[in-house]
Image (cartoon, rainbow, N blue to C red):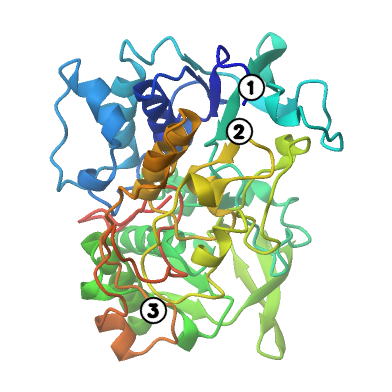
Amino acid sequence: MSEPSLPVVVIGAGPVGLAAAAQLLARGLEPLVLEAGPGIGHAVRAWGHVRMFSPWEFNTDAAARALLEAEGWSAPQPTHYPTGLELVTDYLAPLAATAALRGRIRTGSKVVGIARRDLGRLHDGAGRGAAPFVVHIETCCGVRVIEARAVIDCSGTWHAPNPAGSHGMPAPGETWHAARIAYGIPNVLGDERAAYTGATTLVVGAGHSAMNAVLDLAELAKEAPGTRILWAFRRPLGAVNFGGGAKDGLAQRGELGAHAQALVETGAVTALAPFLIDRITEADGKLAVTGRQEARTTTVQADRLIVATGFRPDLSFLREVRLGLDPAVEATPALAPLIDPNLHSCGTVRPHGEAELRHPEAGFYIAGMKSYGRAPTFLLATGHEQVRSIAAYLAGDVEAARRVELVLPETGVCSTVHSAATSTASCCGPASAAALPEPVSAGACCGPALAPAPKSGGCCG
């Protein structure tokens, strides 16, 4: 391990990054949090209009709560489902303002490179693990350099959405028409309402983000005649998983899938399934989206696209770090088999921590949503457990690092061919720290587990 006097650099001042800082402090280690955005929770604010489908009881970290409570903070109602904005204003912002953390967070500091001091990725040697990390940070005043004893990358995946193109690359024309394409969940019922009112919108994706976008558009359509919704899936409709319904331990998430399914079945939304997008052009002032339906080439027209096809990790600034990544999932080889949606069909995620998150570069970790690579099953509580375990290990407490301190709700979600049975019955047993079933391909969508607002029906981010 590098010089103990150096800080542990934490990348990202979101919920997992700030939890990492709190856990490090609790272990007597010095954290330095680097946030690319102008303020803490920058990515969370981008989906601030979205209501989470995990209540407060699953959304706060124990070490973070201890820092807050020492300064008189009162925890929100544990059964309340916060929006992204509430997560920031009621938890992250007060946490960042505590005496313990406020001098250890630097906003407007984008990490653009990480390496070992004087050692490129190729250079080997017995002293590599003892050399400090050199972190390059882009700020308003140019690039600065900081040394660190360890690095925990909690930067998330929000700013690296998957494209609409069916091959995993942007479809020809997708970048060109970017002004009319939104990724994730735009605020259709809020400040972006005018762009979607009376328009035809094509939503691409089958997960919770897509469901939330469709529900918001359906709510808008009730008030704005002429608002039309097309929903493109990459698989046949019979293979689309709308979730665990009433059996989902996160009730809001179960309702989300049930509402989305009802919109398709009643014809309130026009489903295109399967529909594999090949190119995007313009015709008659509209976007002309050409794709394949079975053996036919089809072109549909829409005023706007919402692409909700998931996210991927940004690895560009880690070129000089020795990473160990599964070739498909882009998580560590130890974690990937536990979360790979191609292998597993059932609901929760087996507990894991420092050991499963290790990379060949000693002292470097990826935690939070980014640790899951391209898998969509991340839950916020899982991220808290990850950084607790990492902090314990960095402090030399191997026993605590290996101990499991995580309890998750039963998801009731299965990635099987859709049927009446899968929409009403859970395929998973109770999720507990002691024994968790295999993970699911259709878990939480992005960052925290997200779900619809009780009345508006819109939410995921």
Tell me if mark 1 has few (under 14), some (14-19) or many (20+) residues whose alpha carbon lies within 10 angstroms of its own. Answer: many
Number of marks in the rendered image? 3
User: Which residue, given by chain and number where applicable, does mark 2 sit on?
Assistant: 363
Residue 436 versus residue 158 in the image, above or below? below
Callout 2: SS: loop
Tell me if mark 3 has few (under 14), some (14-19) or many (20+) residues whose alpha carbon lies within 10 angstroms of its own. Answer: some
The residue lying at 40 percent from left, 62 percent from top is 349
Discs 1, 3 touching: Cβ within 8 Å: no
Amino acid type at mark 1: Ser
Amino acid type at mark 3: Val
User: Which residue, given by chain and number where applicable, does mark 3 sit on?
Assistant: 264
User: Which residue, given by chain and number where applicable, does mark 1 sit on?
Assistant: 2
The residue lying at 67 percent from left, 69 percent from top is 289
Q: Quadrant of residue 284?
A: bottom right
The residue lying at 31 percent from left, 60 percent from top is 219
Residue 212 in view of the camera? yes
Earlier sequence position, callout 1 versus callout 3 = 1
Residue 240 vs residue 442, the one in the foreground: 442
Image location of residue 300, percent across then percent down: 63, 74
Which mark lies nearer to you, 1 or 3? Answer: 1
Tell me if mark 2 has few (under 14), some (14-19) or many (20+) residues whose alpha carbon lies within 10 angstroms of its own. Answer: many
**Which residue lies most toward the right here?**
122
Which mark lies nearer to you, 3 or 2? Answer: 2
